[in-house]
Amino acid sequence: MTDFKPHTVWLVGAGPGDPDLLTRKAERVLALADVVFHDALVGPGVLELVGPGARLVPVGKRAGRHSRSQAAIDRMIVAAALAGQRVVRLKGGDPAIFARTAEELAACRAAGIPVRICPGITAASAAAASLAVPLTLRGEARALTFMTAHACAGEGADIDWKALADPQATLAIYMGKAMAGHIAHQLIAAGLDPATPVALVENASLPGERRFHSRLDLLPIAARSVLGHGPAVILIGPALEAARVPQSGPDLASERPLAAGAP
Ligand code: SAH
């Protein structure tokens, strides 16, 4: 049985949005919390599971708009735990994937506060489930890489595109909408087949979920023209071939492909 003493912190994965995709441990910890510091991406259905007496504090960051700095979030968590509260830091998806968990763990440990992690279903897993495809495929997709497109934005970002352009792997790109064109161009330039299957899933597991199938050379057009304002994950690789079933949205096959070598 999950134990939650005062003066402690749980870093909890809220999953992709659908409260049915939460772990039982997360549900139990949420019910016991005195205060819950949550991301903007945590679904409303999940927040309803927080106990009635608990304080809900949004500390969300969305697409570059930082409502609070990471250091401020670290300080708030630590201060609440030092004050004797049962503290939950509730994060979208899995706390181990692109979630600033290292900073929060370090801040708690530096203050002598016991901190534990409850895993969650990450966006790529939820997207694959919605598409009804696997992320690995025997003999065809033998590795899975989680990548944040934010890594490409920095000047001189040191990305090994040759390694990422592995035809026998699946690439799961988070926070990738704005950089989709750059990523497709770099992968094709590094040798990945322009016809490699691609899937885009927006609002995976949420009521506004949208799924699109495309190919690598059409990814820039797809990301620009079909995605809305919700969080979206981009999946690239042979395992996505099976996602090529009729889905909602415009038919991108008639659009002009991105030529290899185009900017
Ligand atoms: N820790 C989270 C990732 C946080 S980074 C996880 O494990 O899922 C935020 C990015 O995750 C978003 O920009 C988007 O790329 C992806 N994401 C989060 N929730 C999503 C959802 N419901 N549908 C599609 N992508 C999602």
Image: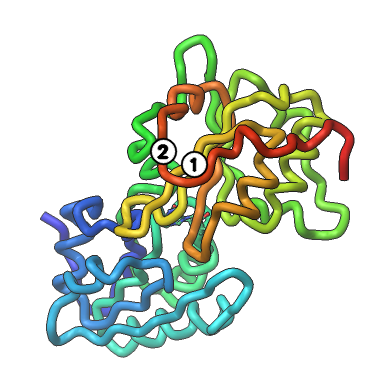
Residue 155: image x %, image y %?
A: 86, 59
Q: Residue tagged by mark 1? A: 212
Image-quadrant location for residue 79 = bottom left
Q: Residue tagged by mark 2? A: 247
Residues 23 and 116: in front is: 23
How would you rate the neighbour count of disc 2 (Cα within 10 Å): few for under 14, some for 14-19, many for 20 or more? few
Residue 246 shows which numbered tag? none
Amino acid type for the residue under numbered disc 1: Phe
Image-quadrant location for residue 126 = top left
Residue 242: image x %, image y %?
A: 44, 23
Residue 86: image x %, image y %?
A: 24, 77
Q: Residue at x 23, y 67 (%)?
A: 45
Q: Tag 2, which secondary structure?
A: loop
Image-quadrant location for residue 248 = top left
Residue 17 visible at all = yes
Asked if disc 1 is less than 8 Å from ligand 1, the answer is no
Q: Earlier in the sequence, mark 2 or mark 1?
A: 1
The answer to whether residue 91 is above or below residue 125 is below
Q: Residue at x 59, y 69 (%)?
A: 63
Residue 127: image x %, image y %?
A: 41, 43
Residues 249 and 223: in front is: 249
Q: Residue at x 50, y 53 (%)?
A: 232
Task: Say left or right for 82 vs 232.
Answer: left
Asked if disc 2 is less than 8 Å from ligand 1, the answer is no
Task: Say left or right for 240 vs 118.
Answer: right
Which residue, as the protein is rendered here, is positioned at the far bottom? 83
Q: What quarter of the picture does the N terminus occupy?
A: bottom left
Does the residue at mark 2 contact the one at mark 1 (Cβ under 8 Å)? yes
